Amino acid sequence: MDINTVLSALANPVRLDILSWLKEPERYFPQQKDTAPEGGICVSHICEKTDLSQPTISLYLSTLSRAGLVSSERVGQWTYYRYEHDVAEAFLNELSQRL
């Protein structure tokens, strides 16, 4: 994990919101509870919540994915994203040690 890549990914308020929502998908996306892979949220639901276009959300999710904060799973034509708790925890530990 590159701490600068993570910090850069978190610098955008919408990306930070998305990460926060993916951390608690049952709270922020209850409509997906029975249809998504474990903990995964479909890009279309994130688009609806942000009222931003699919290409914009895909770009944001790609940035979070490169930082390791989210992972994706393709199911048919849909892509589902989930929060990577272990990476977030490692980032927070490293940041704590540096500051």
Image: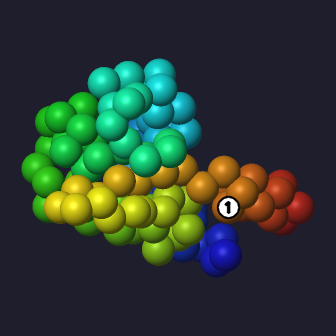
Relative image position of residue 80 (x, y in whole percent): 35, 53
Relative image position of residue 31 (x, y in whole percent): 31, 24
- Foreground of the two, 7 or 33: 33
Relative image position of residue 61 (x, y in whole percent): 35, 60
Residue 8 seen anywhere in this rendered image of the structure: no
- Which image quadrant for residue 69? bottom right
- The residue most toward the bottom is 2
The quadrant of the rendering that contains the N terminus is bottom right
For disc 1, the neighbor class at 10 Å (few under 14, some 14 to 19, many from 20) is some
Residue at point 53%, 69% (across, down): 67
**How many numbered marks, from 0 up?**
1
- Foreground of the two, 7 or 32: 32
- Amino acid at the residue labelled 1: Val
- The residue most toward the right is 97
- 14 relative position to 25: left or right: left
Residue at point 29%, 47% (across, down): 42
Residue tagged 1 = 87
- Foreground of the two, 83 or 17: 83
Relative vertical location of residue 79 with respect to residue 46 in this rendering, above or below: below
Residue 69 seen anywhere in this rendered image of the structure: yes
Relative vertical location of residue 34 with respect to residue 10 in this rendering, above or below: above
Secondary structure category for the residue under label 1: helix
The quadrant of the rendering that contains the C terminus is bottom right
Residue at point 17%, 61% (across, down): 77
- Which image quadrant for residue 81? bottom left
- Foreground of the two, 9 or 20: 20
State the scheme by which the image is colored.
rainbow
Relative image position of residue 35 (x, y in whole percent): 33, 37
